[in-house]
Image (cartoon, helix red, strand yellow):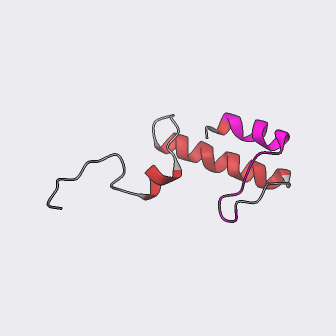
Amino acid sequence: MPSSEVMKKFKAGKLKSGGSGDTVENPKQAIAIMLSEKRNEAEHGGHYVSGGERHNPLSGKRRKRGE
């Protein structure tokens, strides 16, 4: 999600942590998530890239049948 949405989700009680998937209750943790999202956006030219796209080098690329 884009960094601008992180605090909105936190205030609504719908922000989940990445590792355990539990709801984030600590505002400091929400800020840390927001800063992480901002770094992600900055690395990718100002647009959001999902976690799967960040960690999987083959995502978004089609492979040939024999590979």
Task: Tell how many labels.
Answer: 0
Residue 53 in the image, given as x and y percentages of width and height: 44, 50
| Residue 16 within the segment the image draws in magenta | yes
Q: Measured along the vertical axis of the image, is residue 57 above or below residue 46?
A: below
Q: Image point 57% across, 46% down: which residue? A: 39
Residue 56 in the image, given as x and y percentages of width and height: 40, 57
Q: Image point 46% across, 41% down: which residue? A: 44
Q: Image point 77% across, 45% down: which residue? A: 14
Residue 62 in the image, given as x and y percentages of width and height: 25, 48
Residue closest to the eye, 40 or 18? 18
Over which residues does the magenta segment extend? 4-20
Does residue 12 appear left or right of residue 55 in this picture? right
Residue closest to the eye, 25 or 43? 25
| Residue 33 within the segment the image draws in magenta | no
> Which quadrant does the C terminus fall into?
bottom left
Q: Measured along the vertical axis of the image, is residue 49 above or below residue 21?
A: above
Does residue 49 appear left or right of residue 10 in this picture? left
Residue 47 in the image, given as x and y percentages of width and height: 50, 35
Which residue is most to the front?
A: 65
Q: Measured along the vertical axis of the image, is residue 48 above or below residue 56?
A: above
> Which quadrant does the N terminus fall into?
top right
Which residue is most to the bottom?
A: 20
Q: Image point 68% across, 34% down: which residue? A: 4
